[in-house]
Structures are given as C-alpha cells and as structure tokens.
Amino acid sequence: MTVLVSDVEASRPEGLSIAADRIADDSGRLSGIIAQQRQQLAELRQSWQGTAADAATARGEHDLARQEQFRDRLQALSDALPDGGAQLASVRGAVMQVVDDLRRSGWQVSDDGVATAPPFFPLPIRAMAPAFTSIIQKLLAQFSAVDLATANAISAAGGFKQSPTKPDIPDPPADPPVDEGQAEHGSQPWYSRADDYAFKEVAEAAATAADLRGWDNAARHLQHYLDNSGADLNVDVDDVLHDLPGAQRQTDALVNAEVARIVEEAAATGNYGQPIPFQTGWHDYTVDQATHPDWFYAMGSFEQSVSGVVTVHPPTTPGGKPTVTVEYKTHIFDRYNWDNGKSVEIGGVTITDQQMGELHTAGLAQEYNVRGSSTTYTYTGVAPTATAPVALPPAVPGERVPR
C-alpha cells in the first residue's frame, strides 16, 4: 500500500511512546500481583498437604504461568513501541520538513509526493522538481517500510502471528527534465506554412517507407507525431529490453545495485523477512543506430528506471549467505521532439530535424511523451553483493503493436 503525504502528516508516532509507558505501568502492577499470589501459594503448600492440596497448588501454578506469560508480552510490547515510534517520528519529521519548506517557498506538493515549482520560477529552479519528488517519494517509501516493520514487531511481541503485508511495486519516478524542442505548437504565422503542408506529405511517405522496411516502432512513433494529438504514446518495455541487450544490462545493473544495498542494510540491522520497496532515478540510454535502427529512429535516446520490492531471507546455516525474493519492473520515458542541426534518412527519405520541428510550430504535427512500464519480473535466489551481481530473468517480448 502506498503511503501518501497526508497519511504521514496525520500520523502521531509519539502516541506509541505514550502507549508504551502505560503498558509498562500495567506490566509493573501485574508483576506485583504475581509476586503476592506466588507468596500466598507458597504459604498454602506449607499449611495444606494431601491430594486435594496438590491439585489446588497445580492449578495455582498453571494460572501464575499464564499471568507471567501475559506480563512478558506486555513487557515486550512496551519495549517494541518506543523503538518503532522513534523511527516513525524521525522519518515523519524528514518528510514534513521537505514538504513544508517547499510549500512555504511557493511550490506545490501533491499527496503522492510530486513537487511542482511555480511557472514563474527560473528554469534552473524548476528543473529541480524531479530531484525533490524523488526525495519525497523515497521518504514516503521509507515511512511505509518502517510502519510495516513496527506493526510486525508489535504483533510478534504480543504473541500474534501476522504475515508481512507486501507493499506495491512503486510507480515510475516523476518525469525527468526534457530538452526544449521547438517553439510552441502552432506558433508559426499562418502565411509561412505553405512549405510545411508540402513537407508533411514527405514525412508521411517516410513513415510508410519505415513501415515497409520493417521498422515498426520508428513508423509508429513518427505517425503518432504526424497524427498531431500530442497524447502520450505507450511503448512496450518488454520489447525494448528484449531487442536492446544494452538496455537489459542497464536494468540488471540497477536492480542488482538496489537489492545489494537493501541486503547490506538487512544484514546490519537483522531486519530479515520484511518486504522493502525500492525505486531508482532516471538513467540515460542511447540506442546504437547501426545495430538497432528501428529503435534508434523511434526514440534515439531515452530515460530508464527500475522499481520493485525485495524481501531478504536470513542465511539457513551459520556463516551462510542470505537469499532474496525480488519483484521488479523497468520504466522508460522519452520526449519525442526534433532538434535543429540534424538530419536522418528513414526508408530512403532524407528529412531534417528543422523541417520536422517546423511541422510542430505550424500546428501540423505535435511533440509528445513516450512512456511505459514492463511486466513484473521475479528473481528468487542467492543475494547479490556490490561486487557479485546475479543473473536476472531476461525480458520476454510482448505482442508486437501494429502501426
């Protein structure tokens, strides 16, 4: 379950410490009662012998054992509550400090932790939005993990058996900054658009040529640009990873690094068996034109991120290695636009970035975002380390999307 900013704000971790004090008092009073009853039982043994006396003292010992067990649970609860409360209070303080500081500075922070700067802020300041969003969302994930660990610790201390609730795989990070592309859509004067109408026919021919050549993705992305909707285009990330070994290797490296970090923390704290969510930032990947022209003309370069949930299991033998269960996804983001000063040949048709970009400013085509997430992949086995990564499952291509 995803924790929201409002959930953290409404939480009152200090209540756990107050409850711990009350439970400690109850435990102390119960210890006094148990001591009195044990003294009375000892006196009964001295003054009463026989079969009936033995049966009575046996029942008394049984009742005292149950009371002592209950007292021990109370004591364990009073020990667990302050630890969880202190950790939750620390993370809550960090979340609210970042959120409150941003809001006081004029920023907006949504309930899921997305930070948005006012439009009149300078561009370098607005470009910091993804970094602030990443910080807030990682703190929210940390609060969720500590909350879950505290709940499990309380359940264990109270003698209740509770299976850990596995959190959802985190969503992709906030969109990364994009280059400016061309001017505003439709900003070109109407009287200067005649050549753009003619060139759009050339661009349509390029899309058809790419399709005939088998460059399905290049044709689909170009045609979406020419369709002039500006709507997001979903990309099949499983296909991307299957077709581009370098992108698959980048996913594997990101997952291994995150899991190794969480395994190291679990070994240091003994926090085994708890599902821990993770999410990376965006990482650039550039497609090689010579070996993968279809994806090169479709996206060129794109941003790549992974997120998932990992559970670290303790070693089964002393000195052994822990094992892990990992579920994860790969996310991709790209801005489909055209920069001046470049040209490409698609299906035998040479087109320049300036010509393609002017279709956007003429209102005849429109830039858009490409995004997508893979299916969920699962790895169970030996835990990776910073110097010894493990082999993860390869991507399985999905059903190819027709143009």
Image (cartoon, rainbow, N blue to C red):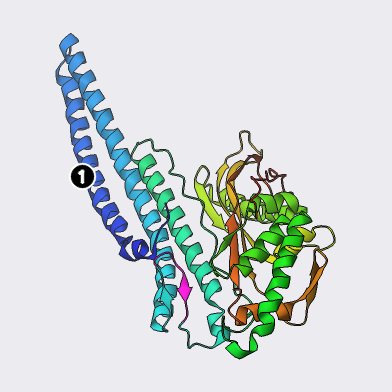
Identify the element where label 1 is drawn: helix
Please, which residue is most extreme toward the right here?
Answer: 290
Query: Which of these two is toward me, 94 or 116?
Result: 116
- In the depicted structure, whether residue 10 falls above or below residue 338: above
Give the magenta part as a residue range: 111-117
68 sits left or right of 346 in the view: left
Counting the numbered discs, the total is: 1
- Say left or right for 325 vs 90: right
As drawn, 395 above or below 297: above
Q: Is residue 288 magenta?
A: no
Residue 282 placement (x, y as % from top left): 62, 65
Q: Nearer the viewer, residue 117 or 222?
A: 222
Q: Nearer the viewer, residue 365 or 374?
A: 365
| Quadrant housing the C terminus | bottom right
Q: Is residue 350 visible?
A: yes
Q: Is residue 280 visible?
A: no
Horizontal placement of 247 versus 149: left or right? Answer: right
In the rendered image, residue 137, in percent from the top left (x then y), is placed at: 48, 64
Q: What residue sits right under mark 1 in the picture?
A: 29
Q: Nearer the viewer, residue 165 or 161?
A: 165
Q: Within 10 angstroms of label 1, few (less than 14), some, or many (20 or more) residues?
A: few
Q: Main secondary structure of the magenta part?
A: loop
Q: Is residue 390 left or right of residue 9?
A: right
Residue 269 x, y percent position in the rendering? 54, 51
Place residue 193 in its image quadrant.
bottom right
